[in-house]
Image: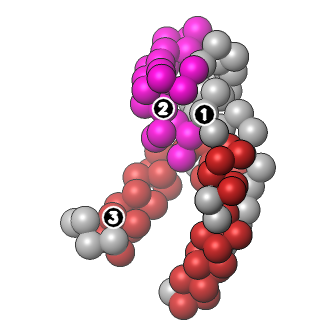
Amino acid sequence: LAKSISDAGWYQFIQMLEYKSKWYGRELIKVVPNHTSQDCSVCGWRNKELELKDRSWTCINGHTLERDLNAAINIRNKGVGHTPSAWEIYSDIGRVAQESHLL
Ligand SMILES: [Zn+2]
């Protein structure tokens, strides 16, 4: 899947993100995407059995995760270089939703 996505124009997508980031005065941070879907964003446990069809899953410590939201939180954490508080995550989500005119 990753290969087919890269063939479909990652370079152009990154170019657009860089342009828009500059336009809005934002910093674009690229992160290594390895295991961002498999790692629990709460405790860090890695689900090596996770398959693409699994849309939500529960880690061995009982954290129930929605696949894409979990991955998004892990990507964010890699970008900022630390594990943010719940307040930071929700204020980010709110800001993005407002800027995207979803709120
Ligand atoms: Zn967990």
- Give the number of the disc on residue 67: 2
Q: Which callout, 3 or 2, points at the residue further toward the start of the chain?
A: 2
Dot 1 surroundings within 10 Å: few (below 14), some, or many (20 or more)? many
User: Residue 50's spot in the image, x, y percent?
Assistant: 59, 19
Question: In this image, 89 relative to 25: left or right?
Answer: left
Residue name at image x 74 percent, y 55 percent: 31
User: Residue 96's spot in the image, x, y percent?
Assistant: 40, 66
Which residue lies under the disc numbered 1? Answer: 37
Q: Is residue 93 magenta?
A: no
Q: Which callout, 3 or 1, points at the residue further toward the start of the chain?
A: 1
Q: Is residue 40 above or below residue 16?
A: above
Q: Is residue 66 magenta?
A: yes
| Circle 3: element type | helix
Q: Is residue 80 above or below residue 40?
A: below
Q: Amino acid at mark 3?
A: Ala
Question: How far apart, in angstroms, are the residues tagged by discs 2 and 1?
Answer: 6 Å
Q: Is mark 1 within 8 Å of ligand 1?
A: no
Q: Which callout, 2 or 1, points at the residue further toward the start of the chain?
A: 1
| Circle 2: element type | helix
**Magenta stretch bounds:** 51-72
| Number of dots carrying numbers | 3
